[in-house]
Amino acid sequence: MKSPTKPVDVRYKNPDNDPLGPYVLSEVTSPFDRPSLRYEWHGQLPPAGRCWRYSAERAQALEAEGRISFSPTGRPRLKRYLSEIERPEPVVEVAPRSQLEFIVRSAMKSVAAAIARNPMCLKDVEWRDLERALREVFEGLGFNTQLTRSGKDGGFDLKLECKEAEKTRIFLVEVKHWIGSGKKAGGSILSAMIDVVAKAANGATGLLLSTSGFTADVLKGRTEVEQQKVRIGGRSKVVSLCQSYLQSAEGLWSPTTELADMLLEGTQ
């Protein structure tokens, strides 16, 4: 008996008889303004306040591979193939640590999805819940994730790990969620994060996220080495991560770059 088509499968079509099979078209811009990624692509520029997701060289390579589709107006979009989506067998939790933990983590997935659909709801999310929601986001994107205990975090909220060229990359993420008060993260917060990463002594990279942004002088005096060790990202980065998570959960997105590159995209 033929098994029924999974709900996500109906999204995938093959109108041009692509030999790789059915696909969906996904966005090739990011919600950041990076001059190096604002270039003409077949006469098209990314919308104001956005940039291309790929370098010009990577865009040309994707086009040469037949992975780019152009609309009648010349708008490029990326083909995401159904055949490339991993569909692991569902994992049954035989002995969950607690039913409450399952409920909380399920709720945090919903919070992340809500932020992706309506970024304005960020103001209604409490700081600890945002940390929990981001744990689900990072795990959903492919990181091994550890959420630290509140008040005993050693200067960071989440520890992320991923494999890159057979090497384990480690990221320490600190989240400042002061969107309600409008308080911005400043140089002292960044300096503290730099110290935390330096003391980690495991080759870690730091990521400081602030939903209310940063003070004008936050980067003042930061050395090039410190910039490589700790990156900063604002509200748009948090929203972008949640949107990538939601698209991944719906089978509409998978990274075409290393996870580490995706994580640091759009940060300073």
Image (cartoon, rainbow, N blue to C red):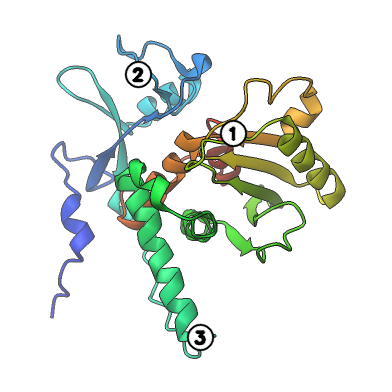
- Mark 1 to mark 2 CA distance (whole Å): 29 Å
Kind of element beneath mark 1: loop
Counting residues from the start of the chain, the first of labels 2 and 3 encountered is: 2
Residue position for label 2: 46
Q: Specify the amino acid type for callout 3.
A: Ser
Is 232 in front, or is 41? 232
Kind of element beneath mark 3: loop
- Mark 2 to mark 3 CA distance (whole Å): 47 Å
Residue position for label 1: 184
Residue 6 visible in the displayed image: yes
Residue 153, relative to residue 81: is it above or below?
Answer: below
Kind of element beneath mark 2: loop
Counting residues from the start of the chain, the first of labels 1 and 2 encountered is: 2
Is 11 in front, or is 134? 134
> Among all residues in the image, which is located at the extreme front?
181
Residue 253 visible in the displayed image: no
Between marks 2 and 3 in the image, the one whose residue lies nearer the viewer: 3
Is 183 in front, or is 43? 183
Judge from the rendering whether residue 128 lies leftward or rightward of residue 31; answer left or right.
right
At x 38%, y 76%, the residue is 90
